[in-house]
Image: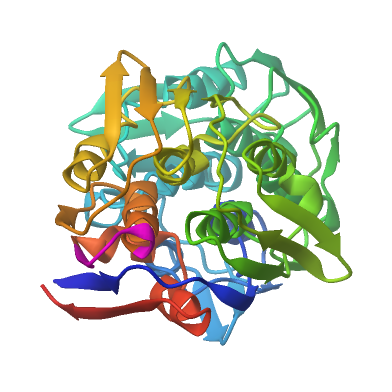
Amino acid sequence: MEKIVIEGGSRLEGTVAISGAKNAALPILVSALLTEGWNTFDNVPDLKDIRTIKRLLIDLGGKVETSGSVVKVDASGLNSYEAPYDLVRTMRASVLVLGPLLARLGRARVSLPGGCAIGARPINLHLKGLEELGAQISLEHGYIEAQARSLKGAVVYFDIVTVTGTENLIMAAALAEGVTTLRNAAREPEVVALAETLNRMGAQITGAGTPVITIKGVEALKPTSFSIIPDRIEAGTFMVAAGVTRGNIKVVGCEPSHLGAMINKLQQAGIRVDQEADGLRIVGTEMISSVDVKTLPYPGFPTDMQAQFMVLMCLANGLSVISETIFENRFIHVSELKRMGADIAISGNTAVVRGGGRLTAAPVMATDLRASASLILAGLAAEGTTEVSRVYHIDRGYESIEKKLAQLGGHLWRAPA
């Protein structure tokens, strides 16, 4: 067990390179299950969740080779339809193997998923959609049992926008007979990246990035190569880091078009965001303005940036209202921020942040991935030395975050807990 120790008060300056997006890499690596032969993916981040999905692919009979940020996957020898509890319990994205296994083998047995404790995040929408494609599904002893002699195209309407549900259905429908139409589909860049990967494999997918996605099933897919898109949440986290430390950071390797909501809110807070040839420059301000935020599905403000932005609002002048509409338990970090002097009141899915005060160092505990990032940001802005424990969460979604922040002038390091 480790902790991250942060000596606050340093102004961050310099250039930081953004890694590949975990939430794009996971479904794209899984999509290799739909093909026979070697797929090559580059710009894959070295994260705990990525290592877990690679172990799962091997467990299912696939071959995985890794060289730096390049990962090759060959599922020609796919010989198992079961994703066991020991692998799935730590990572919700493991449920993404459900659609490809059904499409390829006609059967899947997948443990109900785990992951961060930020809300129920039910997978009923995945299961309902697969049933509409012709799958027979039951829940037995903590496992999803699914069978389908053949999948057939259908019109699937999602009652709630679901990213992993959209991705699961896209992969299943790619090899289904006929045409599938997904309505109220997720529009995230990660969904678009998956669709582009599948189209390179020979799939016929149109409409990705809009609420209506159409998939015309094909008989077989072929291996391909694809470069993972930049991580917009990592980019957003470093953008906020510039704000909370009144710093000057150039974020390179990001995709500005994926960051519209974040850029808008930072600019409203008085932080300068300039687009340069190879990225974005973010310049903090001494007088941070309070801004109201409501999390929404893409292209709205991302729920994965809510905790980090809240730290910025703790340092702003005046009141800000932060509404969380995606996950019901995503204010768990608030109690830890209050230990550091934050003035935050919660009512239901709304947090009222009274800024203008100062944050002071305290021992705090991370409860989930993005909460970990918010507490590190708070430690950078706080007076004194902050210790963040249970940082194994951070390793699920950020590649060497403490090293990248240290290169920008932050004083932080890992230590035994």
Residue 173's place in the image compared with 38, above or below, is above
Name of the residue lying farthest toward the bottom? 67
> Percent from the top left, x then y, of residue 89?
26, 48
Residue drawn at 54 percent across, 27 percent down? 295
Q: Is residue 250 left or right of residue 412?
A: right
Q: Is residue 383 magenta?
A: yes
Residue drawn at 32 percent across, 28 percent down? 119
> Percent from the top left, x then y, of residue 358?
32, 48
Which of the 4 image quarters holds residue 334? top left
> Percent from the top left, x then y, of residue 173?
69, 34
Q: Is residue 103 left or right of residue 222?
A: left
Q: Please state which of residues 243 and 150 is positioned toward the viewer in this rendering.
A: 243
Q: Is residue 3 magenta?
A: no
**Magenta extent:** 380-387
Q: Is residue 225 left or right of residue 406?
A: right
Q: Please state which of residues 329 and 226 is positioned toward the viewer in this rendering.
A: 329
The answer, for residue 279, to whether it is visible in the render is yes
Q: Please state which of residues 314 and 214 is positioned toward the viewer in this rendering.
A: 314
Total numbered labels: 0
The answer, for residue 55, to whether it is visible in the render is no
Q: Please state which of residues 340 and 416 is positioned toward the viewer in this rendering.
A: 340
What quarter of the picture does the C terminus occupy? bottom left
Display coloring: rainbow
Residue drawn at 56 percent across, 11 percent down? 159
What quarter of the picture does the N terminus occupy? bottom left
> Percent from the top left, x then y, of residue 228?
69, 64
